Amino acid sequence: MRVASVIDVSLVDVPKIPVTVIFTAGCNMNCPYCQNAEIIPQTSGTQMTISDIVNRVRGNFSDGYCITGGEPTIHKDLPDLLKALRDDGAKYINLNTQGSVPDVLERCLPYLDSIWFDMKTTPERYLEVTRAKTDPWSRVLRSIRLVLQSNVVFWPRTTYVGRWMHPDEIVRIAQLLAKLGFEGEYIIQNFIKSSGVRELEIVEIEEPSREEVEKIVDEIPPQISLRLEWR
């Protein structure tokens, strides 16, 4: 597995739980607003064995782990890492994923407590927004269903990007989640221009206003609560 970096203790990646954050390197999507664009290449980061990773993160003053990226599920040995962390005493494990590799995700579910699931856009725009080699929507849909059928807590989340998205897309994503049987919070976070975003991409996108999304709150299905996290 290729690892980009590790944050020993984070208080913001999992609600109310201090975690050690492991950033895997490489992603099979190429979203223009990516905040970690430097680790999109699958040659980025450092190759590490499972035992090396466990030894690196052992002993931090945290209650568990958040595995993020990049896209962690492109690494076929991800389930082995999660099992090793559990065997080493991990009390809590969270995964950040965009759901494009359901076969690996399914093998991860027995070791997970929660998943931040990045809903990129509406189904028909997935190829446009993610700029993946092939349309990933059918695989993403399978992943959503797998998580909803499991005991893992499902936290859907969308990054709202100015000039790149429309508020109606949030409504349609929420309607889709409701149709699939999801009940709970759907988090919308704002895109922020940061040093991690490629300069050439910035000209096409912008930081959105909160008011742009607030106007569609009443259109969200009743079983879903929209939470706006403007940073």
Image: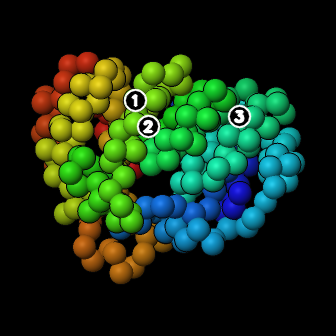
Q: Foreground: 51 or 62?
A: 51
Q: What residue type is labelled 3?
A: Gly
Residue at label 3? Answer: 64
Instruction: Give the crowd class for mark 2: few <14, some 14-19, many >=20 residues within 10 Å.
Output: many
Instruction: Determine the residue positioned at 84% across, 33% down.
Output: 88
Residue at label 1? Answer: 145
Residue 145, image quadrant? top left
Residue 1, image x, y percentages:
71, 57
Instruction: Determine the residue positioned at 73% across, 67% down.
Output: 46
Checking the image for residue 143, the label placed there is 2
Q: Nearer the viewer, mark 3 or mark 1?
A: 1
Residue 161 seen in the figure: yes
Check whether the beta carbons of the residues at disc 2 and disc 1 lie within 8 A of each other: yes
Instruction: Determine the residue positioned at 75% across, 64% down.
Output: 47
Residue 106, image x, y percentages:
55, 34
Q: Mark 3 or 2 closer to N-term?
A: 3
Q: Is residue 190 above or below residue 66?
A: below
Instruction: Give the crowd class for mark 3: few <14, some 14-19, many >=20 residues within 10 Å.
Output: many
Q: Mark 3 or 1 closer to N-term?
A: 3
Dot 3: element: loop
